[in-house]
Amino acid sequence: MVTLVVMGWVSGAESGSWACVHPILSKLPPEQQIGLLKTFGRVMPVLMPLSFILVTTLFIGTSPKNDAVFYLRLAATILMGSMILTTILFNVPINIATGNWSDNNLSADWKKKRKRWRFFQGYRSIILVLSFVLVIISAN
């Protein structure tokens, strides 16, 4: 149950942010974008790894071998691992760079970096929702 609650919250927050918040945010002037972007990322650095740990624990601890549940949870675990990996490789470095930007010191390619971040945010959001659905199906 805890796994479903955490995964549901994380997948909903991330996909809602990607689909609803960031498209509007990207239309703001640079200084407003950067100011708002610096306020994000307080809870997800804890909840995303926690959701991966919970899914992995669910897979290892309760999945009967050679059963549909096993393969659903295996797929969810692999997807979540992929989400964590892309977050660390792509989103986190851009988040760190964003945290160092100000109106006076935007890098020349800041728009390109933010576009790359949004792409991987989309990937992450889709993976989170798919993993959540797989875990829901495997719970029935």
Image (cartoon, rainbow, N blue to C red):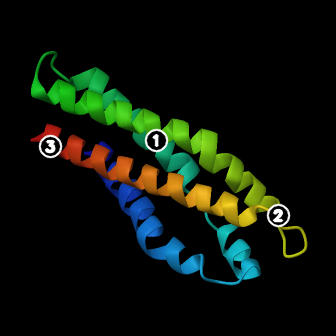
- Most extreme residue toward the top is 65
Q: Residues within 10 Å of mark 1 (few under 14, many from 20)?
A: many
Q: Badge 1 is on which residue?
A: 83
Q: Is residue 61 left or right of residue 11?
A: left
Residue drawn at x 73%, y 78% as measured from the top left:
30
Q: Nearer the viewer, residue 26 or 132?
A: 26
At which x and y percent is residue 3? Answer: 31, 43
Q: Amino acid at mark 2?
A: Ala
Q: Is residue 91 left or right of residue 56?
A: right
Nearest to N terminus: mark 3 or mark 1: 1
Whether residue 30 is visible: yes
Q: Amino acid at mark 3?
A: Ile
121 relative to 18, above or below: above
Q: Nearer the viewer, residue 49 or 128?
A: 128
Q: Quadrant of residue 60?
A: top left
Give me the C-alpha separation between circle 2 and circle 3: 46 Å
